[in-house]
Amino acid sequence: MDTRAPALVVTDLRRSFGGVAAVDGATFSARHGQVTAILGPNGAGKSTTIHCATGLLRPDSGTVRVLGSDPWRAYPDLRARVGVMIQDGGLASGARALQLLRYGASLHEKPLDVDEVAEHLGIDEFGSTLVRRLSGGQRQRLALALAIIGRPELVFLDEPTAGMDPSIRRTVRHLIRSLARTGTAVVLTTHLMADVEDLADHVVVMARGRVVTTGSVAEILSSHHSRDGRVHLAARADGIEAERAEALAAELRIVGRRHGVDLEVTTGAADLESVLIDLTRDEETP
């Protein structure tokens, strides 16, 4: 486990717009070598928090530390160590895709190999196309490539797989996991629970500008109590042959009836999305 100080530390962060609190005392951290997912409904404060962490907004109060420094006062050497992918933003529309990626690489001392990144993400297939003519998924791939081309120590990814077809989404998830394995701190926001379940080492759930809960996906699922105070009991067994799974499911239902419970036995993953809705529903109600 990486023993360095967290790459991102947010402490009692507050930011308002016209008297409306977008972020209201948020506190959390993100470590090197881990993927931290920030989740929550629209208006939860995710984007404002990220904008404060990337130096695009100045907090009203509280502190944000990125690689030990204040991002609002960041010098160029700090910015060079941080990658940022903002959904559909910051791309020069008049440039060609591969031309823009090469330019981005030229701004860094030891960038990744442009041709390898372009091939890995399929950018070489539309490299001569003007940015303004790219599809949403193609723009996402280019924005991701620009965020990682400089070998960042910390990278912020906003909806990194949005608009992508399944094969490219699988490639992007593999790339994100690889980034974390090399020690990069990855902070992502997404509405795709499959991304979270597949990638996140640490989850931060926000609602109405506040952090509702944090932990691993397994910790959040196992500790969650529904609004009526009942708990969700779940068991998982991997790699079972189909005929054995059917027999096991039948026996589990018998045990459940013995305890007065009707068990629903499925082969799917735990439903993180329903837990997220439950956790944030009360916070959304004034």
Image: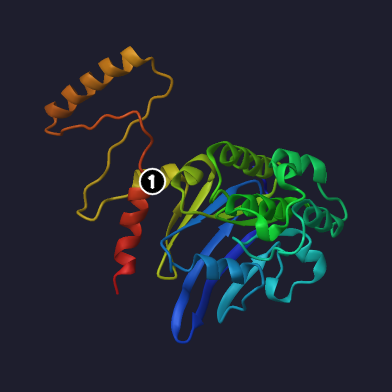
Provide residue 252's location: percent of width, then percent of height: 23, 23
Q: Residue furthest bottom?
A: 18
Q: Identify the residue at horizontal 62%, vertical 42% (top origin).
A: 172
Whether residue 205 sits left or right of residue 229 in the image: it is right
Task: Return the residue at label 1.
Answer: 272
Provide residue 191's location: percent of width, then percent of height: 46, 53
What kind of element bears circle 1?
Answer: helix
State whether residue 259 is above or below residue 151. above
State whether residue 161 is above or below residue 45. above
Residue 89 occupies which quadrant of the picture? bottom right
Whether residue 266 sits left or right of residue 164 in the image: it is left
Residue 31 visible, this angle: no
Q: Identify the residue at horizontal 64%, vertical 50% (top origin).
A: 138
Q: Identify the residue at horizontal 46%, vertical 55% (top origin).
A: 214
Q: Nearer the viewer, residue 47 or 209?
A: 47
State whether residue 213 is above or below residue 124. below
Provide residue 84's location: percent of width, then percent of height: 67, 60
Residue 17 visible, this angle: yes
Q: Which image quadrant: the N terminus?
A: top right
Q: Give the amino acid at mark 1.
A: Leu
Q: Identify the residue at horizontal 67%, vertical 46% (top origin).
A: 2
Q: Nearer the viewer, residue 278 or 221?
A: 278
